[in-house]
């Protein structure tokens, strides 16, 4: 990978610059940092370059992240920690289009990544950067998906992994992954926001490299969800892209990806972003409602444990993403998001509860007339159905008379049950 453009860290507020190899997550002024590169870089790249790599056998080209490497991170190939990841599918299902009343509705399933969520896209880049800066240990706070991903990439890279999760508040599937991949996991008596504050202190004190999305290299990787989606659509941009919003790293990444793709002329128009929060964890929605004049902090509670977050770290970047794409923010109740999840599951696609916010939000904005019926819309499904089996089973039991009854191993018993339930 020959470096073609310069890269540096830049403050999103005062635009102070720092060396790309400096370990820091905030500017001296206190604001967030983002990775920037030589002006005009995107214009010098053509989508046909990325398209040509789709049929290549090169490992970097086969990653749906490193396929876009000129706009992600320029580094020597030996530093790259890749599974590979990405190259997820884009689905259409008539039943879901009908349910949302949006005929041209697509689903980009990020649950098809190696550890079952979109986090792998950011983690391959942040783990690579960790290797570049010589980190021996990496850490994050997590509601479960970031920790699973960090654990897997740290294992591959041979680095110590330390994760902080809210005690008793992450799903069994995510906990199993985190421990199984070999991370050291501390359960913090508090919510995600408390764990997030704690991990920042720990990283500072113990010289551990922080891999939450406050780390700007995570954002660079997550941009490729959008770029690959645009590629899937032959660079014909949709009207709306909907995603669940928690700590707001992904909303920030989507905004940056769209602005860069538009600036580079890879797409002719800028899609609008729709960030969807759960009603019980809605600080970004509250802020949107007052025109982003203030930030809010809530005590989070929602069935969608992945986004049970009350004080999102990437607020400022996400505000820019919504404003610059003419986007919108909405909230959906636990009931609404679980209904949407059931539709996605029953369509044979499946996702975890938080992911279903995207469809629930699209349906809501369609009902409100904000999204037009003839709009082309992509919902991003952020996590796999198997991430939270308990939520799926309890929801199935909640909404249907058929659960999973026990029977004696006798044909007549089976016949009786099937006659009663399925009418067979
Ligand atoms: N969907 C899923 C499945 C998630 O795991 C997350 C975040 C989000 C959506 C929201 O993305 O935070 O960038 O706004 N999960 C983090 C974690 C917090 O620790 O796994 P965001």
Image (cartoon, helix red, strand yellow):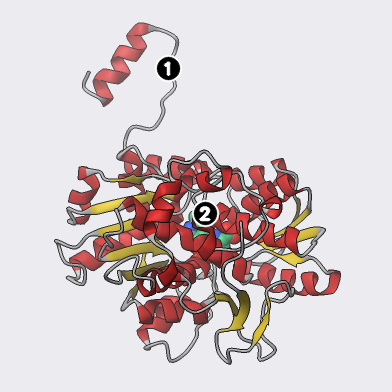
Q: Which disc, if any, is residue 321?
A: none
Q: Which residue reaches farthest top?
A: 411
Please state if 378 lies on the left or on the right of 34 as rendered. Answer: left
**Residue under pointer 1:** 407
Residue shown at 27%/71% (left/top)?
Answer: 269
Residue 287: quadrant of the picture: bottom left
Who is closer to the viewer here, 321 or 360? 321
- Asked whether mark 2 lies closer than 8 Å to ligand 1, one says no
Near mark 2 (Cα within 10 A), the count class, few <14, some 14-19 or many ≥20, is many
Q: Is residue 327 above or below residue 79?
A: below
Please state if 40 lies on the left or on the right of 95 as rendered. Answer: right
Q: Which residue reaches farthest left?
A: 374
Percent x, y for residue 48?
A: 37, 55
In whole angstroms, how far apart are the C-alphas of marks 1 and 2? Answer: 48 Å
Near mark 1 (Cα within 10 A), the count class, few <14, some 14-19 or many ≥20, is few
Q: Is residue 408 above or below residue 278?
A: above
For the C terminus, the image quarter is: top left
Q: Which residue reaches farthest right?
A: 206
Percent x, y for residue 399?
A: 33, 44
Please state if 109 lies on the left or on the right of 181 as rendered. Answer: left
Q: Which disc, if any, is residue 65?
A: 2
């Amino acid at each position: 990978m020959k470096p073609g453009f310069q890269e540096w860290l830049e403050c999103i507020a005062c635009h102070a610059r720092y060396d790309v190899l400096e370990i820091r997550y905030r500017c001296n002024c206190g604001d967030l940092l983002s990775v920037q590169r030589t002006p005009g870089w995107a214009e010098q790249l053509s989508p046909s370059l990325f398209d040509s790599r789709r049929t290549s056998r090169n490992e970097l080209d086969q990653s749906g992240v490193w396929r876009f490497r000129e706009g992600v991170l320029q580094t020597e190939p030996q530093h790259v920690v890749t599974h590979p990841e990405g190259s997820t599918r884009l689905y259409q299902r008539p039943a879901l289009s009908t349910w949302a009343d949006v005929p041209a509705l697509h689903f980009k399933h990020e649950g098809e990544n190696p550890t079952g969520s979109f986090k792998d896209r950011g983690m391959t880049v942040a783990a690579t950067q960790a290797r570049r800066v010589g980190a021996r240990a990496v850490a994050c706070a997590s509601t479960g998906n970031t920790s699973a991903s960090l654990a897997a990439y740290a294992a591959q890279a041979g680095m110590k992994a330390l994760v902080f999760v809210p005690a008793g508040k992450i799903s069994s599937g995510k906990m199993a992954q985190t421990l199984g991949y070999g991370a050291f996991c501390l359960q913090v008596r508090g919510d995600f926001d408390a764990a997030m504050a704690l991990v920042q202190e720990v990283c500072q004190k113990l010289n551990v490299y922080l891999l939450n999305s406050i780390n700007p290299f995570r954002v660079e990787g997550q941009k490729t969800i959008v770029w690959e989606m645009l590629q899937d659509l032959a660079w014909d941009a949709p009207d709306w892209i909907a995603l669940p919003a928690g700590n707001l790293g992904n909303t920030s990444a989507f905004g940056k990806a769209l602005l860069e793709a538009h600036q580079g002329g890879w797409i002719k128009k800028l899609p609008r972003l729709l960030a969807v929060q759960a009603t019980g964890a809605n600080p970004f929605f509250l802020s949107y409602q007052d025109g982003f004049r203030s930030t809010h902090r809530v005590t989070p509670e929602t069935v969608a444990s992945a986004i049970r977050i009350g004080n999102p770290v990437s607020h400022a970047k996400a505000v820019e993403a919504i404003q610059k794409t003419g986007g919108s923010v909405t909230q959906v109740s636990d009931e609404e998001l679980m209904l949407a999840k059931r539709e996605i599951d029953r369509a044979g696609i499946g996702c975890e509860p938080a992911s279903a916010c995207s469809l629930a939000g699209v349906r809501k904005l369609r009902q409100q007339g904000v999204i037009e019926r003839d709009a082309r819309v992509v919902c991003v499904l952020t996590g796999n159905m198997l991430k939270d089996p308990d939520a799926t089973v309890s929801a199935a039991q909640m909404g249907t008379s058929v659960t999973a009854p026990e029977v004696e191993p006798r044909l007549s018993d089976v016949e009786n049950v099937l006659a009663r339930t399925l009418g067979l």
